[in-house]
Image (cartoon, helix red, strand yellow):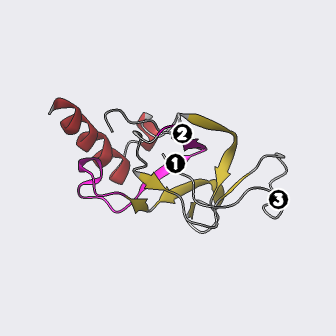
Amino acid sequence: MAVSRAVIHDSLNATQGKSTDFQVRTLAGHQLFSGIDHFNLYGGWALKPLNSTSGVLALTNASAWLDMRRDQIRDHNPQGQFGQREFIVFGDDAIFQNQFLVGNNLQMAKNMAAWMAD
């Protein structure tokens, strides 16, 4: 799994006015996402599978971008969809912290626990 050197920004799905905090809305049909149509990231990094046996379960929208220069200017930074089977990797260390473990993130955590118990 490759990890980006910069945080993803998604202005289109931003929450609370911060482009680094956003909703991920492109979700694969997977038990992990049962009952939810999005989940929130809070300063996530882009992840890229390095082999054909890995699959992507969630993507940002096509206008998301990486702040490689750390100048918060989208125009000269990489843009596109950024993603996150037998194991799951999230590019966000805050996604399941207590303060963010509400709504769809809480439901996804419950789904993940049920999936892992199977």
Residue 40's spot in the image, x, y percent? 47, 52
Image quarter where the C terminus lies is top left
* Circle 2 residue: 91
Between 30 and 53, the one nearer to me in the picture: 53
Residue 54's spot in the image, x, y percent? 42, 40
Q: Kindly check if marks 1 and 3 are in contact, taking CB atoms under 8 A apart as contact.
A: no
Residue depicted at 82% across the width and 64% down the height: 75
Between 47 and 113, the one nearer to me in the picture: 47
* Circle 1 residue: 41
- Name which residue type carries label 1: Leu
Q: Which mark is residue 87?
A: none
Q: Is residue 111 left or right of residue 91?
A: left
Q: Quadrant of residue 116?
A: top left
* Circle 3 residue: 73
Between 14 and 9, the one nearer to me in the picture: 9
Structural distance between the alpha carbons of marks 2 and 1: 8 Å
Q: Secondary structure at mark 2?
A: loop
- Name which residue type carries label 3: Ile
Q: Kindly check if marks 2 and 3 are in contact, taking CB atoms under 8 A apart as contact.
A: no
Q: Residue furthest front?
A: 52
> In the rendered image of this protein, does residue 62 appear above or below residue 105?
below
